[in-house]
Each structure stands twice: as structure tokens, then as C-alpha cells.
Amino acid sequence: MDSKERAALIREGNAAFNDADYPKARELYLRCDYKDGLIRLGDYYMYEKRLPILAYGYYKKAGHTQKIDEIFQRMLYALGTWIGMDKFKIKEAPAKDDKPLSPDDFTVHPILKAKAMEILQKSGKK
């Protein structure tokens, strides 16, 4: 795709987004791999619709690691609140200026791990 065609698709996608035609905007942004547009869609689903899992997909496609990390941290917090923070053990508390927490920063309680494996086996994922 040449730059003129890509620019036209981006303009059309932006117009669709502004007209709240999000499926059309999504299709156009994906067709021309317009990362800023995908981030805009992610922000819409994250903050206006409050659908972080849907927003995660847009951020992932756009390669927006900061937002992906933010969603990951929120999920860990929600999971910890739901099942009890005593099931998680943080290896070392990060300093305020350190990078966000990652899955390697946690040790999962064996009972929680067994339950997760059981759910994966029942759903055919493992």
C-alpha cells in the first residue's frame, strides 16, 4: 500500500471514529496498521466503555507496552483482591521509579496454581 492510499484510509478511519462507527474505524486502522488509531480505540474501550480486556487487544496490536502493563497490574490487583492477597508473594518490593511488576515478580500459591491448571484442562487449553 502506498503512502497516499494509507493516508486516505487513516482519514476515513478517523472520520468513522469521530462518527462513533468503531467497527469501521477498527477495520480501517487494522488494514493500514495505524497504531495511533488502534491506541485511540483502546483508550475508548478502556476509559469510556470500561472494557479493559477488549482494550488490551488494541494496545497489544499497537505495541503500546505502557498500557498493556497498566492493564496487567490492574488484573493482578483485582485477582489478588478477589482471592486474597495472601495467595501472592512478591519476591521483592520494587522502588517507585522501577519498572512495572511482571509475572516473574510473583510466586503463585500452589493451591491457586492447581486450580488454574484444573480450569485450563477442563476448557481444553492445556
Image (cartoon, helix red, strand yellow):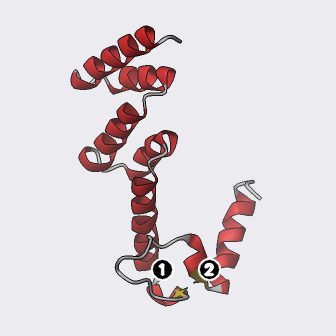
According to the image, label 1 marks what residue?
83
Query: In which quarter of the view is residue 77 placed?
Result: bottom left
Mark drawn on residue 70: none
Determine the CA span between mark 2 and mark 1: 9 Å
Q: Residue at x 26, y 49 (%)?
A: 47
In the visual, does 48 lie left or right of 54?
left
Classify 10 Å Cα crowding around label 2: few (below 14), some (14-19), many (20 and above).
Answer: few
Q: Say which quarter of the image contains residue 81.
A: bottom left
Residue 61 versus residue 102 in the image, above or below: above
State whether residue 117 is above or below residue 8: below
Residue at 44% in and 45% down: 59
Of labels 2 and 1, earlier in sequence is: 1
> Could you tell me which secondary element the residue under label 2 belongs to?
helix
The amino acid marked with disc number 1 is Ile
The count of marks equals: 2
Answer yes or no: do the residues labelled 2 and 1 have beta carbons within 8 Å? yes
Residue placed under numbered mark 2 in the picture? 112
Q: Position of residue 1 (x, y in %)?
A: 53, 12
On-image quarter of the C terminus:
bottom right
Amino acid type assigned to the residue bearing label 2 in the image: Leu
Q: Tell me which residue sits at (37%, 42%) in the image.
A: 42
